Amino acid sequence: MLTLGFDTSAAHVAAALLSGDEVLSVRGDLMAKGQAEHLMPMMEEMLAGAGKSWQDLDRIGVGIGPGNFTGIRIAVSAARGLALSLNIPAIGVSGFEVAAFGADAHFRALVNAPRDQVYCLESGQEMPVLMPRVDLPDTTAETFEFSTLSAEDIALRIARIAAVSGKAERPAPLYIRAADAAPPKDPLPQIIG
């Protein structure tokens, strides 16, 4: 099974190509902007370098966040479009799944949030909690942080999780808090006709 996993939820564009358990290609390019223009050509190069084409793919894994709003939208949109055009499944993989990949039953996964906060998900919880990093409670759970992983490791974990996933729903962005931007409070101007 040929699986392509990719992520743009942070300041990177990362992708990994797996054939079963074998890593054919992995790449992580650090970048603060320009992910939308960089993602597809990068994956095209990786496929060509492995002697593969888009039509050879069996499934796609994509990072769904939490993270950079625009970055998440870029990756999820690309995954949905590829899945639809290639008629293959696209599997959404959260940053919590990536961070805790391979963990035992009792863990705590952390993903950085704005303003020195973290999103925290402990094993057994359904929804992550947003809290200041300094307020993290002591726990016996092993802690895994998304931010300590390299872009390449993130892409590899996404691909490995997607390769064995039984998820069937379309990937969707994982937003835990509302966007910082808000519509203007001033009334809209009247159009005189």
Image (cartoon, rainbow, N blue to C red):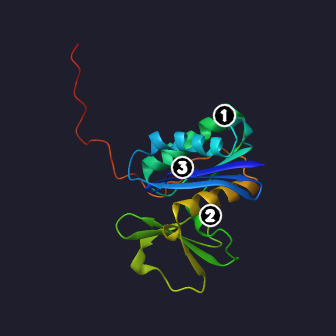
Residue underneath mark 2: 97
Among numbered discs 1 and 3, the one appearing first in the sequence: 1
Residue type for callout 2: Glu
Left or right: 70 as drawn, with respect to 89: left
Residue type for callout 1: Leu
Residue underneath mark 3: 173
Left or right: 174 as drawn, with respect to 31: right
Foreground mark, 3 or 2, reads: 2
Residue type for callout 3: Pro
Q: Give the answer, above or below, for where 72 lies relative to 145.
A: above
Find the distance from the CA under tag 2 to the CA under tag 1.
24 Å
Find the distance from the CA under tag 1 to the CA under tag 3.
17 Å
Element under disc 3: loop
How far across and how far down the image is residue 172, in percent?
58, 47
Using the image, tell me which numbered label, if any, was put on residue 84: 1
User: Image quadrant of residue 47?
Assistant: top right
How far across and how far down the image is residue 109, in percent?
56, 71
Left or right: 155 as drawn, with respect to 135: right
Q: Give the answer, above or below, for where 96 lies relative to 105.
A: above
How far across and how far down the image is residue 102, in percent?
68, 71
- Please name whichever residue, 72 or 41, is drawn nearer the observer in this view of the structure: 41
Left or right: 134 as drawn, with respect to 124: left
